[in-house]
Each structure stands twice: as C-alpha cells, then as structure tokens.
C-alpha cells in the first residue's frame, strides 16, 4: 500500500495492527485479535473521516495515486474480446494511448483511453500517460472507424496532459489535439467519457468531449495542473493547495458547473483501496449512460453534443 | 440568435485617430534597438522599419489597416457570466479584469467586426494580447462563436487573428471548455461551406493553438511568431531537451508542415483578399487603399444600383 502524505496517521495505525498480527503469528500463545480489531476500527473511522473531507489538492493526490485502477485494468475487467488496434498510419503507435475493438456486455464498442503504467518499466513505456500527437491521431482513426461501423465509443481519461517534448511539438501536438476534439464532436455514435484519475488540460479534452461525461468521486479535470497554475499566478509552485482550491477542479465542482454529468462513488479510502469495487461501479455507470443514449439517431447525437457545449458555463456554479 | 442587435457606428479612425497621436513619441524596437518615430511605426502597422520585427498590434489598429478605409462594424458578443468560479489568486479575478479593461479600453480579449477588404465582405476576429495575454475564456469563446454565426449569416469568410498565452486560468475548467466550443464554431463555417482563414500572430500558445487556431482552411503566420502548445521554457524544464534555433517559430512550423504561409504584415491584407476571393468564387479584386465601402453619405453614388457589383450579405438589416 502506498500512503499519501495526509494518510500518515492512518499508516501508523494500520502498521501497528499489522505488527501485532505478525507477532501473534510467531507466538501462538499470544492473543492480539481484540487489540488489532480495535486498531482496525480506528483506522477505518479515520479513513472515512479523511476521505469525507478531502481538500481539492488532496483529491489531486488521490487522482494521481499509483495504486488506482488504470485504463488497462478497466479494459481487462469490463470488456471482453478486447482487440487492440495500433498506430496512427502516419508515424508511430503511441503507447500512452490504448484503444481498440471490444465487447461491453456482449455489445461491440470502441474503447480508447490513456494508460499511465504501473511500475517503472511500464510507466516509461506508457510515457506516464502523456500522449504524443500519434496518440490523438490514433484516437481520431478509431473514432472514425467506430462512426462508420456504428459502434459506441467509450473513452477512459487519465493523463497529466499532453507530452511537452520537442518531437511532439514538431509533429503538430496542437493540431492533433484540435482534430481529436473535432472528431469527438463529429461522430454520429454515442461517445461516453469517464475521468478515472487525472483529466489534464487539452490532452483530456481531446478524448472527453462527448455526449456524457462521468467522473470518479476523487478524480479531477482541469485547465492546468495546480502546480503549473501556482507557479504562474502565485509565482510559487508550492502554492498548489491554493491553486487547486481556486481552480474548482474536483468532480463535485465540475458537476455543479455542468461539465460532468455524473459522479461515480468511490469505495471508502478511494479507488486504490478497492480496485475491483471501483471498476465494477464504473461498469455500471457506462451501462447506464449507454442505455440513455441507445436508439438516438446519429444526427441528433451530434446536435445534442453541440448544444451541450455551446450552453456550457452559462450558469456558472448554479448549473 | 441575433448577435447584431447592437450596431456600433462605423468608425472611420484611420484618418482621424492617427493624427491625435502625440507626435513626439518614440518607440524602441526590442529586436534591433532602433528608435522609431511613433507615427512612422503606426503607419507601418507596428513593424520595425529597420529590421522588420513584428511588434504587437491591437485588434482595433489591425482592423483600421485591414478594412477598406478602416471602416468596420463591430459584432456584438454575448456577455458571459463574469467570474463564474469566484476565482482569487493574489488578486481577485474581477479586479484583474477591470485593470485590463482600464489599460486597454476594451471590454475583453477579442474584437469581432464585419466589413470589406478589397470590396470583399468578411467577418474578422482578432485576439488582443494586451488584454490578460489574450487568454481564452468564456468571452473569447462567445466572440468566436458570434464571429462564425455572423459569417454564416452573411455568407462570407471568417478571418481570425490569433494571439494568446493560452487559456484563462481564472475561469478554470470553463476556459478549457472553450476548446470544444470554438471547435463547434469552426464546424459551423465548414458546414456552411465558408472559408476560415487563421492568421497566427506572436504568440499563439496553449489551448488556443490546440483548438480554433489549428483548424483553419488556410494557416498564415506572421514572421517569427511563436506558435506552440507547450512553450519552450516548459519543454526545457520538464524534459531538459536542448531546443534548436528558431524552434516553434513561424518559419520552423512552416518547415514542419503546420502552416501554409508566413507572410509579412504589410502584405497580409492583399493576400487575404486574394485567397478569400478565390475560395468564394469571386473575380480578382481591386487592391490598394480603397474608400469606405457602400454609399456613405459623403461619397456620391457613381453607378446606378443595377450595375453595382453583386454583394453577399447586406450591410444593414
Ligand atoms: Zn527593429
């Protein structure tokens, strides 16, 4: 278990309980179960209290938690016959973006998402979930195909943002993102997005501009990272707590603003504490959102999506 | 929706306002250091007469030089909610807005107008870098949508001059949502079969580049303009890659296939006339300085209306 800085008191209690049980395993005549159970309860209460009142900055930390289920985990658990489709037919295959054909409850769909990786090796391979132009161009290709074969598109968003690299810029990062957003707005099939962790700026918009946007309870979606915002507006990257607060980037605020349509509840202590449970909840949400859009004519979908974005923001936090 | 509820009287500033400029003002070119006489610089559209360095130009100055005889009619932009997030950094967002308004005498970071260039009706939108770094918030989004709708209504091209440091952070996610919103505006033009020309000026960065600024039918940039998604400093800090000379400048982007042309500001107007008229199926234009379009009171009617060239889009409704 990876503990976040604000979970330190919790780590101590859980550590103590673990120690006690380890001792008991060595000395069979020792009875620690009551004491350990009391500690468990204390830990559970503390966990609930901490997660009930997460500050926006803490939510960012949870959203970036390395133990959260990632795109790959959702695809493996919720979809069958996943058949990855690679490449942008132009330059390369971007491993930060997963995508392909799959079945969701037996129905053929196109699934696309950012994958951050789970250990040093896969994180480097996945470029920490930061797509290059090829990733967006692959997504455009897959969305186009989904449109032609009448397959709903499901996108799983989890990225710190587009990759700030020399090659990415040279190969038209901006244009690739713009085209991907444009494609999201053009396709005549349902497009459902779920922010499963971090929705970082343009890199997230390129996948998340759909008919429905759901966010996990402790996920975030923002125009800029709190650290980046703090260094520009506060001239001090250490002011990320203040920036996170001001940016209103939590799922709860985005729901109030009308940007997120749905907030998916996470288990106590966040998705990282019950990965299977989280994945299951996301599956239910996808099924529900798909059902809402089923049978809607393609032109109507495009018109509705357009209206959704044109109206967005007109009511501020009262939306 | 009718954006044109609020007609602003045509401004004939090209002749008058320039004369009111203090004659004794000098500007130093930050590229070559030459001291430039203010009026000379204004007449050259803020391009250094010594080294051709393209300095910032406000949307109003640009429109004065762009439209025939400097006559244009502003297109009203629907006002968005001010400070939707109650954003506060070291200053309150409304205070920053007011300061920018006072400093620029403009309502926000984009100006939209209709008028004629070489007798070609167009809608033009220009981003104002001097207003909070031209940042894209809900107003800029509304302005681009209003510009597209005005162009569709008049069946004429949209010419957009971009200049921005990126998104308006003080509007948080709602500034990010201008990426899809402005993309929809571009879509409206495409569906109406109307040209959308983007002129990328220094600097055009961040979310602006990753939406409407990179979705034009034709991309023209001003010389040496910085155009990028992630800025050079961000790249150097995060990945510690050494960047080549001229990286992310207009000429570099032209080399890498992201632009159609790099054009000197002084030649831009003629080029825009040429391109828009060809795309609109119109005959070659008359170029050069033209008197105000349509029959202004002080201009005598030269030909009977029946022989006047056909116009797309009425001037008034
Ligand atoms: Zn100079």
Image (cartoon, grey):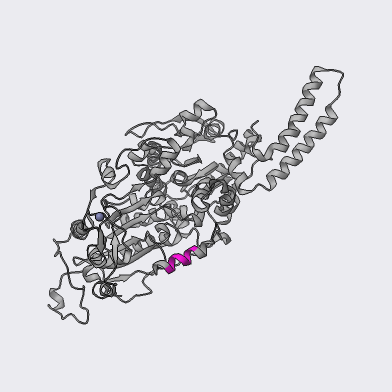
Give percent across and percent down for residue B30: 30, 55
Reply above or below: B8 against A91: below
Q: Quadrant of the C terminus of chain B?
A: bottom left
Taking the image as shown, residue A3 lies to the left or right of residue A225, namely right
Query: Magenta span covers which residues?
Result: B96-102
Reply above or below: A270 against B61: above
Give percent across and percent down for residue B2: 38, 70
Type of secondary structure dominating the magenta stretch: helix
Nearest the eye: B299 or A306: B299
Give percent across and percent down for residue B166: 41, 52
Residue B97 covered by magenta stretch: yes
Residue B159 covered by magenta stretch: no
Taking the image as shown, residue A282 lies to the left or right of residue B36, namely right
Q: Which image quadrant for residue A166?
A: top left
Q: Quadrant of the N terminus of chain B?
A: bottom left
Q: Is residue B78 visible?
A: no
| Ligand 1 quarter of the rendering | bottom left
Q: Residue at x 55, y 32 (%)?
A: A73
Q: Is residue A303 visible?
A: yes
Q: Residue at x 34, y 75 (%)?
A: B8
Nearest the eye: A111 or B77: B77
């Amino acid at each position: 278990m990876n503990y976040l800085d604000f979970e330190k008191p919790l780590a101590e209690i859980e550590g103590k309980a673990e120690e006690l049980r380890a001792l008991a395993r060595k000395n069979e005549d020792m009875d620690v179960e009551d004491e350990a159970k009391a500690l468990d309860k204390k830990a559970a209460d503390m966990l609930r209290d901490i997660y009930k009142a997460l500050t926006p900055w803490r939510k960012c930390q949870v959203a970036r938690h390395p133990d959260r289920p990632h795109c790959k985990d959702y695809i493996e658990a919720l979809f069958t016959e996943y058949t990855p489709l690679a490449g942008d037919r132009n330059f390369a295959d971007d491993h930060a973006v997963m995508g392909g054909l799959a079945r969701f409850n037996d129905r053929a769909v196109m699934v696309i998402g950012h994958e951050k990786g789970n250990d040093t090796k896969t994180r480097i391979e996945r470029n920490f979930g930061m797509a290059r132009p090829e990733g967006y161009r692959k997504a455009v290709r897959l969305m186009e195909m989904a449109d032609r074969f009448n397959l709903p598109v499901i996108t799983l968003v989890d990225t710190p943002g587009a990759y700030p690299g020399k090659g990415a810029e040279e190969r038209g990062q901006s244009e690739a993102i713009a085209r991907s957003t444009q494609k999201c707005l053009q396709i005549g099939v349902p497009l459902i997005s779920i922010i499963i962790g971090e929705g970082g700026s343009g890199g997230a918009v390129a996948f998340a501009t759909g008919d429905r946007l759901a966010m996990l309870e402790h996920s975030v979606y923002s125009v800029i990272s709190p650290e980046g915002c703090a260094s520009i507006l506060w001239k001090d990257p250490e002011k990320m707590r203040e920036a996170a607060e001001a940016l209103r980037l939590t799922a709860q605020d985005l729901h109030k603003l009308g940007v997120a349509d749905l907030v998916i509840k996470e288990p106590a202590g966040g998705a990282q504490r019950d990965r299977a449970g989280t994945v299951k909840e996301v599956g239910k949400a996808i099924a529900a959102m798909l059902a809402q859009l089923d049978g809607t004519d393609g032109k109507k979908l495009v018109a509705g999506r357009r209206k959704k974005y044109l109206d967005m923001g007109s009511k501020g936090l009262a939306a | 929706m009718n954006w044109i509820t609020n007609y602003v009287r045509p401004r004939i500033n090209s002749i008058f306002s320039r004369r009111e400029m203090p004659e004794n003002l000098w500007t130093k070119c930050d590229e070559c250091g030459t001291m430039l006489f203010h009026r000379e610089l204004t007449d050259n559209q803020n391009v250094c007469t010594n080294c051709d360095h393209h300095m910032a130009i406000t949307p109003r100055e640009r429109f004065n030089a762009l439209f025939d005889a400097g006559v244009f009619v502003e297109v009203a932009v629907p006002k968005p909610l001010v400070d939707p997030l109650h954003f506060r950094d070291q200053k309150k967002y409304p205070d920053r807005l007011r300061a920018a308004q006072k400093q620029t005498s403009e309502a926000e970071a984009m100006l939209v107008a209709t008028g004629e260039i070489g007798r070609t009706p167009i809608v033009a939108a220009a981003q104002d870098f001097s207003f909070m770094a031209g940042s894209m918030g809900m107003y800029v989004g509304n302005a681009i949508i209003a510009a597209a709708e005005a162009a569709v209504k008049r069946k004429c091209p949209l010419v957009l001059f971009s200049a921005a440091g990126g998104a308006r952070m003080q509007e948080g996610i709602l500034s990010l949502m201008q990426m899809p919103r402005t993309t929809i505006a571009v879509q409206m033009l495409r569906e109406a079969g109307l040209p959308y020309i983007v002129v990328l000026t220094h600097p055009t960065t961040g979310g602006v580049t990753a939406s409407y600024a990179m979705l034009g039918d034709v991309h023209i940039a001003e010389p040496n303009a910085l155009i990028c998604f992630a800025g050079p400093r961000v790249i150097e800090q995060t990945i510690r890659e050494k960047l080549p000379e001229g990286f992310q400048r207009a000429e570099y982007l032209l080399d890498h296939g992201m632009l159609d042309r790099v054009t000197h500001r002084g030649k831009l107007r003629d080029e825009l006339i040429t391109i828009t008229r060809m795309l609109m199926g119109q005959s070659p234009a008359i170029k050069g300085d033209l008197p105000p379009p349509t029959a202004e009171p002080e201009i005598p009617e030269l030909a009977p209306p029946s022989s006047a060239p056909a116009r797309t889009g009425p001037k008034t409704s």
